Image (cartoon, grey):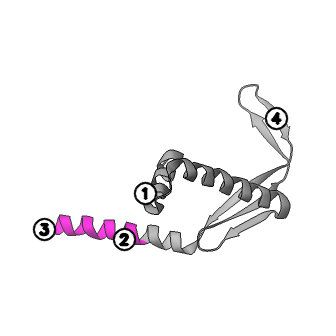
Amino acid sequence: MKRHEVMQGVSDITGIPTFDCDAFVDVLQKVITDGLIKDGKVVIRGFMSFEVQQRESYVGYNPITKEREQFTPLKTIRCKVGTPMKDAINDAQKDATNDAQGETQE
């Protein structure tokens, strides 16, 4: 699903114009980014959590030059999906599996 499809889905459910949904997605991204910069963690309970983590420096291998390189430490963002979303995905997968098994038994 792409950004436009997400905005269209929000618009269909809420009745808010797609243009305003685009602004909402932009604002949500900015708020999450600002929260990560300020606190290092953003938790939207039941949906998703984001956390800044530090990666250590490491020595890697450049396959093009065949030389070892020292990569500097950097920060990455870890995203963790909330339990309600995980449960919905797992339930949908179970339903699809049960439907497929029912079709093969007929």
Give the distance between the C-alpha atoms of the residues marked 1 and 3, in whole angstroms: 37 Å
Residue at numbered disc 1: 12
Q: Look at the numbered disc 4 and give the secondary structure of its residue.
A: strand
Along the horizontal axis of the image, is 20 left or right of 101? right
Disc 2 residue type (three-letter): Lys
User: In the rendered image, which quarter contains the C terminus?
Assistant: bottom left
State the residue at coordinates (44%, 62%): 13
Q: Which residues are magenta?
A: 91-106
Residue at numbered disc 2: 94
As drawn, 59 above or below 28: above
Residue in front for this viewpoint, 27 or 89? 27
Residue at numbered disc 4: 68
Residue at numbered disc 3: 106
State the residue at coordinates (65%, 50%): 26
Mark whose residue sits in front, 4 or 3: 3
Q: Earlier in the sequence, mark 2 or mark 1?
A: 1
Give the x, y percent position of residue 66: 76, 28
Instruction: Look at the image and tell me whether residue 51 can be seen.
Output: yes
